[in-house]
Image: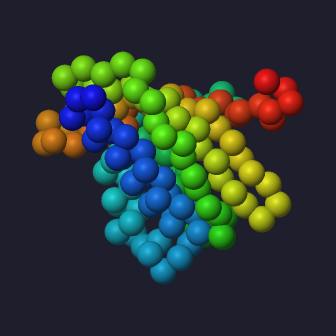
Amino acid sequence: MNLIAKTAIHEVYHSHALIQEWFNGTDKATPQLLDQLLIMFSPDFLMINPKGSKLNRSDLECFFLSMRGARPNVRIEVTEPKVILSGDNYCILRYEELQYMEREVLHRLSTAVFVSDNNGGVLWHHLHETWALPKEDK
């Protein structure tokens, strides 16, 4: 596994930990945490959410602003990301995200494209999420 793939995998775990803090609205959910989150995304970022809507980086910022403390006690878990394809300056990963809330679990299948930030890190460039079907429907 190359360095960019290892860095992208770390970024999946790290960003979801920050998102969990933000959604919970803990004392750590400060403007600085939001800045930490947003800097992880490329200016050209595009997300396709499970409903099929497209969100660019500006839309994502608005979404995050609306979600501070919106899911108290949510616990976010991601499965071990799998490398689909990786090169010198990009990595494509697949993983599952589960958000455990009081009365429901949101389960997404995600494919993410990361690009090098040219400083040894990566940026989220593209994210496509799909709702996971219940086990009996697979």
Extreme-front residue of the structure: 1
Residue 1 % position (x, y): 27, 29
Residue 47 % position (x, y): 51, 33
The picture quadrant where one finds residue 136 is: top right
Q: Is 117 positioned to the left or the right of 131 in the image?
A: left
The C terminus: image quadrant: top right
The residue positioned 24% from the left and 33% from the top of the image is 4
Residue 19 % position (x, y): 50, 58
Extreme-bottom residue of the structure: 27
The picture quadrant where one finds residue 41 is: top left
The colour scheme applied to this rendered structure is rainbow
Q: 15 or 55, which lies in front?
A: 15
Q: Is residue 81 visible?
A: yes
Residue 82 % position (x, y): 45, 30
The residue positioned 71% from the left and 33% from the top of the image is 132
Q: Is 21 positioned to the left or the right of 34 in the image?
A: right
In the displayed structure, 14 sits above or below 8; it is: below
Q: Is 68 positioned to the left or the right of 35 in the image?
A: right
The residue positioned 54% from the left and 46% from the top of the image is 78
The residue positioned 54% from the left and 42% from the top of the image is 79
